[in-house]
Image: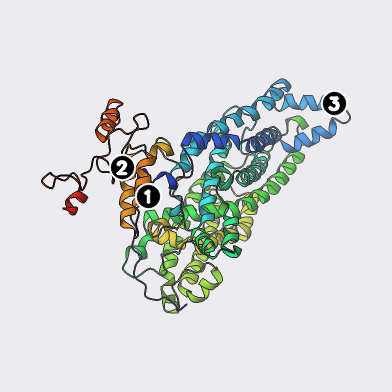
Amino acid sequence: MPPLLNLPPPPRVEPEDPGLVPPAEILAESVRALTRRLLRLSAVPAAILISLWALLFLMYVLGASPTMWFLAALASLADPSFFRYTFTALGFSTNGLWITALLLPAGATAVSLALLPLAARWIAGLNPRDFLSERAFQQAVSSRVTWVLIAPVILTITLLLLAIAVGAPLQWQSFSPGPLSMLCAAVLAVQGAFVGIRAWMRADRILQIPSADSLERTARIDPDLEKRHRAAAALLAQDRRHLPPNPGTPQARAAARPAGAWRALRLISARALVWVLPAMASIGWAIFAMVDVTQVFSGMLEEDLLQVRGQPLDSWMLLLGIPALLVLAVAVAFAPALAVQLAGTSREGVIDQRPYAQWEHRARVNRWEASAVAWTGGLVAGACIAVVLGHALLTTLVGHSTALLWTGVFVAVLIMAPLLAGAAVHAMRSDLRTVLYGPPGWYMRRETTPALVTPDIGTRTQRGQDPAVRAALRTRLRAQAGDHELELFDLDAAAGEKLWLDESLPGAKDTDVREADVARGILPDFGADDSPFQASPEQDRTSIPDTVRGLQER
């Protein structure tokens, strides 16, 4: 196809009112029915959550002093009482451990399952047509359900860290290397559980729709050509948000505004959860575990083995780390805004503004987009290195520099900064348009039948009886080309309208039907096409027409 250049700003489409979506375009009957479906699928997530909570409890016990537990296990081979004595020395009781180990996983999993109605509410208002692809829609459904199920775990870990910070009487008395090593291991366990739950709670299972993979196979190899075209249109829509944005338009400066910066931070952080967090948690577990071993064995020369605890991290390191993270977050949020300005010199290298699906093709024909993405990665890496070095310098100036601090600086500069830059690059390759323009649903509607997951109020059947919904669908049918009289007739008949006779009154006149309906509290829809309460052609020409159609027929 010929290249597209000098495109005008894409117009925004009118948002669809979710309250007027007809029943045929709604996936689930109701929020309650969707909740029941989630509960039927919750056996596998429940097993994963029970295993996760049991593993986290074990990590909490071992985190009091991992090296001491290891040494106690070795010593108990010669004297079993030594292991029981270690329980008491570290502040645990045998009965309390067994009771907690039995009740905590089951109770915490029950709390997660009790939140499934919130998950159903969260995905109920999703409009599949607002997503650029079917895969993106199904991933959004699966991720939202998984986040709700895993939220109690994340909240518990956060509260534990706050309790340690305020000095609560816990077995984890401080942020020493032992608890921090188990915290890194817990992060990896939570991420593994998240991946497992999301793989099971797929959107095609929850909503009983074809998966994105099956839809892609249909679009590629189905023998029916028309079916292939429909599947291809439902699989991926045309992105109308071209790059670079036109100079002087709001989109050209959107990345520097709070909404655009927040979108950039959210998108890059989501990729960092995949790129940065697993690697840093693995490295952190290894470093803190080695530091814990070193501290425990060095303390064995002066103290009793059972009283040896890892020394807490320096408080200045933690206090200065919080503002350093905030500064890094602000720098990451505004990195795309600066990258867009720095990429301005590459605007002449754009030979096609069409948003191709493959990044290699887009980077070859749109040098501006490739330059903006590369600048974003470089700026994020530079900001990460600058913040880490600034934090280390301030900690050194206040006289609290340690070997562990400079080990962390070494790891951050050589490993975390490149990984964070890679996360930013991959986020901007797919979502730079979202940062500058906003969600794709603001500018297009994907050609797919569903327009709503489930009604927010009532059921899908009740939605079909809503006069406002029927009026909106009637208006839509009239605006389309072709004869839709039978569809209009079916629309009113499906809603229970008595068009010219009543089943309980065979051969009854319109007046009898109307009186019977009114007696039962059912009011007629006087605006419905082919309604018996409209004026008929056989009426007296001097009578006043009841409808616009009757007036037009005069």
Left or right? Give the position of 129 relative to 249.
right
For the residues marked 2 and 1, what is the alpha-carbon distance in whole angstroms?
17 Å
Decide which of tag 2 and tag 3 comes sooner along the chain. Answer: 3
Work out whether residue 413 can be spotted: yes
Q: Residue 405 shows which numbered tag? A: none
How dense is the environment of label 1, judged by Cα within 10 Å: few (below 14), some, or many (20 and up)? few
Q: Is residue 125 above or below residue 165?
A: below
Q: Regarding mark 2 in the picture, which secondary structure is present there?
A: helix
How dense is the environment of label 2, judged by Cα within 10 Å: few (below 14), some, or many (20 and up)? some
Left or right? Give the position of 11 relative to 187.
left
The residue shown at (40%, 76%) is 5
For disc 1, the marked residue is: 487
Q: Residue 468 shows which numbered tag? A: 2
Left or right? Give the position of 545 relative to 208.
left
How dense is the environment of label 3, judged by Cα within 10 Å: few (below 14), some, or many (20 and up)? few
Q: Amino acid at mark 2?
A: Ala
Residue 194 position by quadrant: top right
Between 300 and 134, the residue placed more toward the observer is 134
For disc 3, the marked residue is: 80
